[in-house]
Image (cartoon, coloured by chain):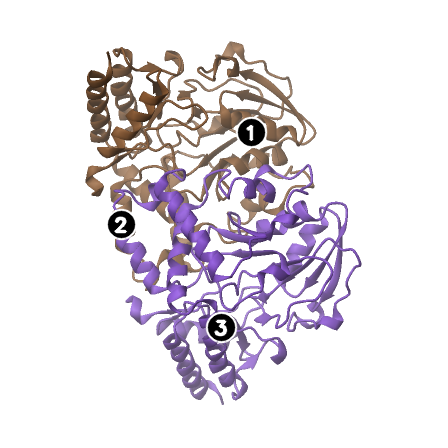
Chain colours: A purple, B brown
Amino acid sequence: MKREEVFNFSAGPSVLPQEALERAAAEILNYNGSGMSVMEMSHRSAFFQEIFDATKAKLKAALAVPDTHEILFLQGGASLQFSMVPLNLLEAGTADYAVTGNFANIAMKEAKKYGNIHVAASSQEDNFSYIPRQEQLDLTPGAKYFYYCANNTIYGTAWDYIPQTEAPLVCDMSSEILSRPVDVSKYGLILAGAQKNMAPAGVTVVIMDKALAGHEMPITPLMLSYKTMIDKDSMYNTPPCWCIYMLGLTLDWLEKQGGVAGMEAIKHEKAQMIYDIIDNSKLYKPCARVDSRSDMNITFRTGDADLDAQFAKEGQARGLMNLKGHRSVGGIRASLYNAQPMEGVKALADYMKEFEVKHHV
Amino acid sequence: MKREEVFNFSAGPSVLPQEALERAAAEILNYNGSGMSVMEMSHRSAFFQEIFDATKAKLKAALAVPDTHEILFLQGGASLQFSMVPLNLLEAGTADYAVTGNFANIAMKEAKKYGNIHVAASSQEDNFSYIPRQEQLDLTPGAKYFYYCANNTIYGTAWDYIPQTEAPLVCDMSSEILSRPVDVSKYGLILAGAQKNMAPAGVTVVIMDKALAGHEMPITPLMLSYKTMIDKDSMYNTPPCWCIYMLGLTLDWLEKQGGVAGMEAIKHEKAQMIYDIIDNSKLYKPCARVDSRSDMNITFRTGDADLDAQFAKEGQARGLMNLKGHRSVGGIRASLYNAQPMEGVKALADYMKEFEVKHHV
């Protein structure tokens, strides 16, 4: 298929801005007169240092990151952060975890390896279909941190409020970072795998309050010390240079779209177009509770696993890719990240209506 | 500068095969009729799974990896392996380390966090200018493993023999993997950051005897368990997809060059061209002892730090990039990895001769 015939609804890695990819294509053999690809550059070279510094500055500007906080470009995805967070922040204390999905659950279990972990809330009993409200959070006095996952990719739920806690907030924003403004000063640590709203898989962004660094356990692997990475400006060793470069290109595109405010202005409109169809449908049933819906990942099902599979398969045949739900839950999932164009959402909407007419008895 | 005017002698990230980059450029917006970039593909999609499987198969073929051994594509560079190796292999035992350079030294110190480590040999007293011989290795009976770094990028030394030990060999081959045939069956575990001979920075190759997996310490972060990664075929979470794809393109190129045997046939010729100039020079002094010389990284100096800097600077002006020695040792370093073309080596040789005529009094 031609690129213009395809819309990619993958939950991650996912669609990147056309403009970012075109620029990468144009520069891939020779970046800015260096005679080299970004993939070939010494990470200590002036050429790459400039890319690195500019990308960091663009991200700092895009999210209005205060000077109290450091931006890190790490490796290993959010999953490595599940270990890095307790190794660095837990010390001999207790941490609270809100378990609102698969990844928050894994993060919680992983943290238990390293100390006292308290489940402050869980929606597991209802298949992670909702986000607990503030009054449902059972907070530990003096907790070292409160951990939550802002957007649950598999279940299609998102927190619509910032939890109020005495403990520093640690938030997995992998699936929603850069989709709306965030008051970074309210967070102790934000982590995000890049492969949804930012860049190709291979770089993990951490934005952390520098005051929280320097308390890692003695068993912490050297690469997993936030302090080391802050001290070395993410270059203790060779960083994932190409992914950082691609993030820079995405941020250039984002700025032209009005930044995170521009994204926020359209993300709800995009999602609502699909939720409206679901809510007015006799075929499609939503998975997430209405008050907990994500604008990034929309989950639904027909109630018939074969029909769900057929929906994904027929969608793919007409260029609507990756509509299958996560393998752990089945159903249908459409991810509408920043780079998903409005025409992609419209194409999905049209397809959903056609499919319902064809298949609803 | 134009690409054809530049030769890149960076120690890593470093030059990639022209052919691999051209193919990446051609496919970057639309891989194989998928309508998507490889950077945008779900790692669970059939499109990417095919790339993954093919790349793994090509690497298995290139190094004749036996079925007893598993190939893993990880993140975090060799530096994360410095922790992962003891966390998974040390148990309650002792491991032997040969300290022949900066990275072996860091690996040894890191391993000490996790148990008993014995320095079986060290060349630190002579500025890491040589590789100890077999009879100099002070081996611990019953050691869990013997660790060494095959090629010391900073110092320009390389092991010209495989150590004979009772313990499984663990070898950092970052700077020489794919430059010659290796009897993988002799190794318990081979690790290599990709950014020298394989791919862009962001993927780390581990080739390990499966029988050694499954003994990780309870404190091992979930992403740092070899067992988990073997069980999940390197996809416990999203792997660095683009880097794996690029590795596949490099391996296609490598095969056309006659594979690792083809590389071995020319690597010594390339290096010797530069060593001959050094040995016949009144200006250049080699850093590594003759019997310990690396074919991958050639280190030398003029004896005058300013003149060394001038050598790198004037080189850069004529398109010979990254000739500065590592910041910890200074001097001059030229890396002649697989993708360094013979004409690049000749251009360096010509430049060295000219520079000597101009500057030797």
Left or right: A268 with respect to B246? Answer: right
Cα–Cα gap, marks 2 and 3: 37 Å
Chain bearing mark 2 = B
Q: Earlier in the sequence, mark 1 or mark 2?
A: 2
| Labelled disc at residue B107 | 1
Q: Residue at x 65, y 73 (%)?
A: A130
Q: Taking A15 as reference, is A79 above or below it?
A: above
Of helix, strand and loop, which one carries label 1? helix
Return the x and y of residue A145 as percentages of the image width and height.
70, 55
Q: Residue at x 37, y 67 (%)?
A: A256
Chain bearing mark 1 = B
Cα–Cα gap, marks 1 and 3: 46 Å
Are labels 1 and 2 on one chain?
yes
Return the x and y of residue A253 as percentages of the image width and height.
37, 63
Residue that carries the numbered disc 3 in the rendered image = A264
Q: Mark 2 belongs to which amino acid?
A: Arg
Of helix, strand and loop, which one carries label 3? helix
Q: Mark 1 belongs to which amino acid?
A: Ala
Q: In which image quadrant can residue A317 be found? A: bottom left
